[in-house]
Amino acid sequence: RLVSAGATKVYAILTHGIFSGPAISRINNACFEAVVVTNTIPQEDKMKQCPKIQVIDISMILAEAIRRTHNGESVSYLFSHVPL
């Protein structure tokens, strides 16, 4: 629907990529430019089946959030200083 409404590219951005059942087939047949997920769940096998899946490593930001929480520092600071 987005493409028929004029979108030139469609992306899906997910936190946890739990691709079960026919999900991979549906993604491969969909108009997504990319499906971006975090590395909270291993995706190597799914990436082989679906070249549209891209994984973002969140280990450093997660480690920093844990460190800040442990030290009583602001975690919200991380989200106002995210490099693009």
Image (spheres, rainbow, N blue to C red):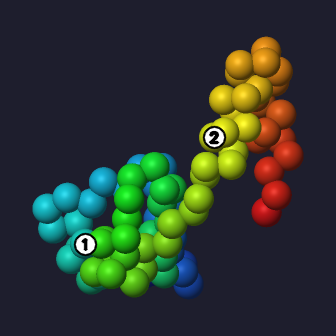
The residue lying toward the viewer, choosing from 73 and 28, is: 73
Please name the residue that numbered disc 1 is placed on. Answer: 24
Q: Is residue 24 above or below residue 41?
A: below
Picture quarter containing residue 26?
bottom left
- The label nearer to you, 1 versus 2, is 2
Q: Secondary structure at mark 1?
A: helix
At label 2, the amino acid type is Leu
Give x and y (percent) for residue 38. Answer: 51, 56
Q: Is residue 70 above or below residue 9?
A: above
Q: Is residue 77 left or right of residue 19?
A: right
The residue lying toward the viewer, choosing from 34 and 68, is: 68
The residues bearing labels 1 and 2 have C-alpha atoms spaced at a distance of 27 Å
Quadrant into which the N terminus falls: bottom left
Give x and y (percent) for residue 44. Answer: 37, 71
Q: Is residue 30 visible?
A: no
Name the residue: 85% across, 46% down: 81
Residues at circles 1 and 2 in contact by the CB criterion of under 8 Å: no
At label 1, the amino acid type is Ile
Quadrant into which the C terminus falls: bottom right
Mark 1 crowd level (few <14, some 14–19, many ≥20, 10 Å Cα):
some
Q: Is residue 73 above or below residue 44?
A: above
Please name the residue that numbered disc 2 is placed on. Answer: 62
